[in-house]
Image: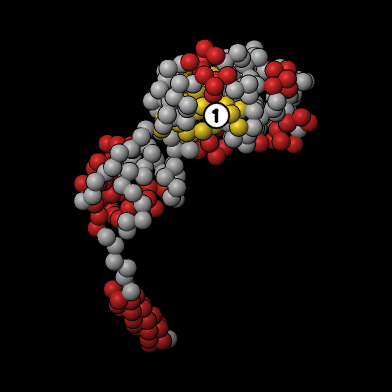
Amino acid sequence: MLQGVLIATILVGAVGLFVGIFLGIAGIKFAVETDPREEEVLNALPGNNCGGCGYAGCSGLAAAIAKGEAPVNACPVGGEPVSKVISGIMGVEAGESVRMTAFVKCQGDCDKAKSDYAYTGVGDCAVMSFVPGGGPKSCNYGCTGFGNCVKACPFDAIHVVNGIAKVDKDRCKACGKCVAACPKSLIELVPYSALIKVSCGSKDKGPVAMKACDVACIGCGLCARNCPAEAISVTDNLAHIDYDKCTSCATCIEKCPKKAIIRES
């Protein structure tokens, strides 16, 4: 019996040794070579894994940059300082980068927006699409204030104040999580340096928009007609600013009869 145990032990050991050697040789033979710069780029990235670059975390972006499939300034969180480090690693020019920030296109807080009824139920913005009228607010385009964007933000840069979401532009890293989380597409990324903004997302015609909110854009076009830089256009009853043309002269703010255009420093 002892002899049988010894034979079994030797066989198991031999099989284990064979498998170990086989796996070792296979690992060497089929090893995938990685660019050493990939690890350097990964170490230079912030490590937030927010996905704002369009890749599945910082490791995905690092691999793409090392392969030349993504620009060195693709990380919205790291911004210019990180892009300069990565450009040094990759031996290329960083290129000019524009700092962006999220902006909520709505001023319809509890004081300015009208309500059709009192709502008691699940506090979720996406659920409002299944609620009569798209939610209690008379404006179906307005911020519902239930904070899906707040939950999505990994940088604590957005909070609901008096019924609508507000962005802290200094904390915002422009990762785009809040943009994706808003079911009404009320949040957009704009240049950090932009001062003049259309703070409304309503596409309703003037009379309907005015009944729903005191500060709704009514699509009158006064802002567009009076802008000296021709930086404003009106589409679907809503004003839009071309930030490449805007000079922040504030003429549009003066001309807007509903105060739907604001200056935000």
- Hey, which quadrant is residue 119 in on the image? top right
In the rendered structure, the answer to whether residue 131 lies left or right of residue 215 reads right
Quadrant of the rendered structure where residue 104 is? Answer: top right
Q: Nearer the viewer, residue 116 or 17?
A: 116
- Is 112 situated left or right of 74 in this image? right
Which is nearer the eye, 117 or 213? Answer: 213
Expressed as whole percent of the image width and height from the top left, the position of residue 91 reads 21, 51
x and y percent of residue 47 in the render? 36, 42
Image quadrant assignment for residue 195: top left
- In the rendered image, which quarter contains the N terminus? bottom left
Q: Position of residue 207 (x, y in %)?
A: 73, 20
In the image, what residue occupies the spot 76% across and 29% down?
A: 133
Instruction: Examine the rendered structure and indicate whether residue 77 appears above or below residue 26.
Output: above
Viewer-nearest residue: 254 or 158: 254
- The residue nearer to you, when weighing 48 against 3, is 48
Q: Determine if residue 158 is in view.
A: no
Instruction: State which quarter of the image contains the C terminus.
Output: top left
Q: Is residue 160 above or below residue 73?
A: above
Circle 1: element type:
strand
Which residue is rendered at x = 58% and y = 29% of the image? 234
Which residue bears the numbered disc 1?
Answer: 233
Tell me what residue is drawn at x 32 percent, y 56 percent: 68
Q: How many marks?
A: 1
- Identify the amino acid type marked 1: Ser
Q: In the picture shown, does residue 187 fall above or below 29?
A: above
Picture residue at 40% right of the left edge, 83% below the top: 8
Question: In this view of the protein, can residue 254 be seen by the observer?
Answer: yes
191 w.r.t. 12: above or below = above
- Callout 1: 10 Å neighbours few (<14), some, many (20+)? some
